[in-house]
Image (cartoon, grey):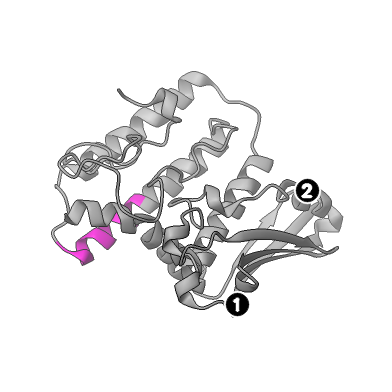
Amino acid sequence: MFIKTFAIALPVLLGGMYVSGALGGGGWSRDVARPQAAVMTALEDLDIRDQPGSPGTDPAQSGGITPVFNLERTDTSMRWKVMSGDKIAVTMIADFKPSADGTATHVTAHVERGDAPDDFVSPAFRSKGVTLGLFAMALEGELNELTLPPPGDPTACARLFERFQEANMAAGAGGRPESLKGAIGQVAATGVRLNAFDAEQRRLGCQHRDGSSDFKSVESSMGASHGDSSSGTSSDGAVNFTPGQPMIDPRPPGERRR
């Protein structure tokens, strides 16, 4: 039961720790080595529903109401409004400012809670902290793809993944956490490894261009787990809490272990 609950909570924990640890709790910012027009164009297809837990896709979690996502754009900002019926659940805002004589862009992001009651809002959009964490990860994924280097050496990329796999194996040797504090610590350590792996992937040009390595498929929905509680593995094999085995396999589904 603990493993199943932990699997459900993982996206929320990741989002919350991303905000509290990396964002300082107030907002998100990043300097991107691309002109403002290119950055804003790259973000036009951003969809927070692609983030861990598929936030906002299950009407059973929001009083039977499926959220509607609307994008509003100005010359210097983009606003994603999440509507619950005729009320606003949350607004996710990204602001843009040219830098380096127009060759780069400073991007900032924050979240504003709307007037929709919690009972009719998806869990991911009730908390500004969780929403900002998911929004920031979505922004990072789109901007990482925009700034990817040319494809890297397959051999070097294979060695990188082997090292990542070995690190996960070593981390999993201690067994599953016995408490919520231990679970949070384990998720934090996993987040550090994932961030380091993601940065090295980008440096070497190894990252998958379809975005499938971007913190996805942790759970199919922010509801009941579909995994087998005896194995601790989600239905698509993306998360594995078996002691001695990697917790998260960052490869696309078609390349994962069978």
Nearer to the camera, 24 or 134 = 134
Q: Magenta segment, which residues?
A: 179-190
Q: Above or below — where is 95 with respect to 36?
A: below
Task: Please state which amino acid type lies under the numbered disc 2.
Answer: Thr
Which residue is depicted at the point 36% across and 55% down?
Answer: 223
Cα distance in 3D space between marks 2 and 1: 26 Å
Where is residue 117 shown, x and y percent of the image?
51, 78
Compared with residue 25, is residue 73 higher up or lower down, i.e. above or below? above
Q: Nearer the viewer, residue 237 or 181?
A: 237
For the image, the number of numbered tags is 2
Question: Is 16 included in the stretch rendered in magenta?
Answer: no
Image coordinates for residue 205, horizontal then vertical, percent: 58, 31
Residue picked out by circle 1: 114
In the image, taking residue 258 as reference, residue 210 lies left or right, namely right
Q: Amino acid at mark 1?
A: Gly
Residue 188 magenta: yes
Q: Is residue 126 visible?
A: no
Local packing at callout 1 (Cα closer than 10 Å; few below 14, some 14-19, many 20+) is: some
For the N terminus, which image quadrant? bottom left
Q: Which residue is mark 2?
A: 41
